[in-house]
Image (cartoon, helix red, strand yellow):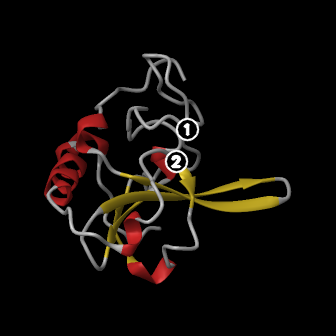
């Protein structure tokens, strides 16, 4: 991941600017066949090659980012209105990707457990991005 452009959390505006620029893309596209407003497994309807990595939220010098999540209003990981907090899990392990066909912006990371690996994806909604500092994690 070291070769990717790190979207530094102190330059929070970078992610917000990318999200704002992609918000105007409203053309029908294969990437919108499955709703991705909240975290979901990468759908078969969205070929991996259709997504171009444009940066990462994974800090290059941080060996183990926190697994703490940020849900101040009682949302959950799966909620479509959950805040996008780059310093918190799973955002702190995500790459920022753009659809090659329409320009929509997505976050992707690999969820892994004892016996599985799952590619997760979420559309970036600029209104949900928050610059939340890490607290007591």
Q: Residue at x 37, y 59 (%)?
A: 106
Q: Residue at x 56, y 50 (%)?
A: 63
The residue singled out by tag 1 in the image is 78
* Residue reaching furthest to the bottom: 49
Q: Secondary structure at mark 1?
A: loop
Please tell me in which quadrant of the rendered image residue 125 appears.
top left
Q: Which mark is residue 39?
A: 2
Q: Vertically, is 19 above or below 81?
A: below
x, y (%) of residue 74? 50, 17
* Residue reaching furthest to the right: 115
Please tell me in which quadrant of the rendered image residue 65 appears.
top right
Q: Which mark is residue 104?
A: none
**Label 1 to label 2: alpha-carbon separation:** 6 Å
Q: Nearer the viewer, residue 112 or 73?
A: 73
- Relative to residue 93, is residue 41 drawn left or right? right
Disc 1 crowd rating (10 Å Cα; few below 14, some 14-19, many 20+) is: few
x, y (%) of residue 102? 25, 73
Q: Which of the two labelled residues, at mark 1 and mark 2, occupies the earlier sequence position?
A: 2
**Cβ atoms at labels 1 and 2 below 8 Å apart:** yes
x, y (%) of residue 35? 45, 54
Q: Secondary structure at mark 2?
A: loop
Q: Residue at x 56, y 66 (%)?
A: 43
- Which quadrant is home to the C terminus? top right
Q: Vertically, is 27 above or below 38?
A: below
Disc 2 crowd rating (10 Å Cα; few below 14, some 14-19, many 20+) is: many
- Relative to residue 137, is residue 35 drawn left or right? left
Q: Nearer the viewer, residue 79 or 88?
A: 79
x, y (%) of residue 110? 60, 59
Q: Residue at x 38, y 32 (%)?
A: 83
């Amino acid at each position: 991941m070291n070769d990717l452009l790190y979207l530094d959390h102190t330059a929070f505006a970078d992610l917000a600017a990318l999200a704002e620029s992609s918000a105007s893309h409203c053309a029908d596209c294969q990437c919108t066949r499955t709703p991705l407003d909240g975290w979901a497994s990468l759908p078969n309807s969205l070929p991996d090659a259709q997504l171009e990595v444009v940066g990462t939220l994974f800090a290059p010098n941080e060996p183990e980012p926190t697994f703490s999540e940020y849900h101040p209003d009682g949302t959950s990981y799966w909620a479509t209105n959950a805040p996008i907090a780059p310093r918190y899990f799973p955002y702190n392990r995500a790459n920022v990707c753009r659809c090659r066909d329409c320009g929509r912006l997505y976050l992707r990371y690999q969820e892994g457990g004892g016996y599985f690996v799952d590619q997760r994806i979420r559309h970036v909604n600029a209104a949900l991005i928050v610059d939340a500092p890490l607290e007591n994690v």
